[in-house]
Image (cartoon, rainbow, N blue to C red):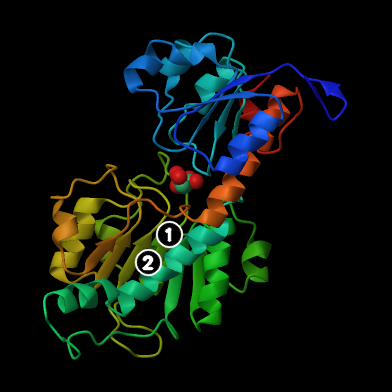
Amino acid sequence: MTFLGYTRLMARIAVTDGMAKDAVTLLEESGHEVVLGTIGAEDLLNGALSEFDAIIVRSATKIPAAVIEATSDRVRVIGRAGVGVDNIDIEAAAQSGVPVVNAPRASTQSVVELTIGHLLSSLRHIPRSDRGLRNGQWEKKAMKGTELSGKNLGLIGFGRIAQGVGTVAQALGMDIHTYDPYLPPKVAKAQNTILHKNVDTLFANCTHISIHCNLNDETHHLVNAKRLAMMPGRSNDGIDCGNHIVNCARGGIIDESALLEALETGVLASAALDVFEIEPVPADAPLLQHENFHGTPHIGAATMEAQARVGRDIALAVMAVLDGKKCETTVNAHLLD
Ligand code: MLT
């Protein structure tokens, strides 16, 4: 097939967790065959990917080392249609010479907006009020909330999404604190943010905390009982606003048993999660039963706009690698020869 003056060999691309229609069209109009559909864990372990030149996944398909080992040399690139690559063993992929590419910018705005939505929902008791209305309760007094304005928001991790959250929260009158051991202090300064060298001091200074880091050995259960107990409960403007946690990043960064206990003992006034230690979270999980908890089913990037951008970005990244080009969103570039 000739495309933009090049003779191009068609690639067979598996898309296992769905993708925006326009992105599928882009791949097909570029001369590739797209095979849409879930591939079960057992089939993956039995080498089902060997029939493909490229695979594009979201978070549902897991690609551990055993799947990569079971796959023939035909696979030339793995695309993660999103940001987090914790479902792919990027080291094992590099050992097999396979670049893993992602789409790190496409969903930023959508996750920023969901994070702010969760914060506002917690502070103004929107989920509880709605449940009350459906039960015929008009609980005006019990639903007295607090403003975001005048409170300290602690951001754990200060990448693109956290910076976006910080900008919106500042516009709402919040003061921004951050903990990010990899952040050059000048970036924090430029964003008018107080950078903490120690995560404990962030907890000790913030009544509101939102998580924006990756899940890894360093960050697993970074939010635990000891740190939750450090939160001040009273804001700089003298309001007993209580303590509030939001996580739209990854499950496992918060110890969910500690979170529930903190809600039960009043250490936390609210918790809102888009991501869970086990996904899908079981409906009978005790956390879900707590009145001051509300959650969403990992929908940070689930907007029409984000999915259109994610699809396009990952399609272009995968095609760049298939064309033998370097791709700037290769997350295991440092491990490849
Ligand atoms: C991401 O890492 O891009 C988000 O968590 C969204 C997703 O996994 O679909």
The residue at 41%/63% (across/down) is 210
Amino acid under disc 1: Val
User: Which residue occupies the extreme right position in the image?
Assistant: 5
Residue 197 in view: no
Q: How many marks?
A: 2
The residue at 60%/55% (across/down) is 183
In the rendering, which numbered label is found on residue 163?
none
- Nearer to me, 7 or 204: 7
Residue tagged 2: 203
- Nearer to me, 19 or 95: 19
Residue 199 in view: yes
Left or right of 105, for residue 178: left
Locate residue 320, reporting x and y percent.
72, 30
- Nearer to me, 249 or 315: 315
Q: Are marks 1 and 2 in contact (CB under 8 Å)?
A: yes
Locate residue 30, reporting x and y percent.
71, 29
Q: Is residue 291 above or below residue 226?
A: below
Locate residue 2, reporting x and y percent.
82, 22
Locate residue 324, reporting x and y percent.
75, 22
Distance Cα–Cα, label 1 vs label 2 = 7 Å
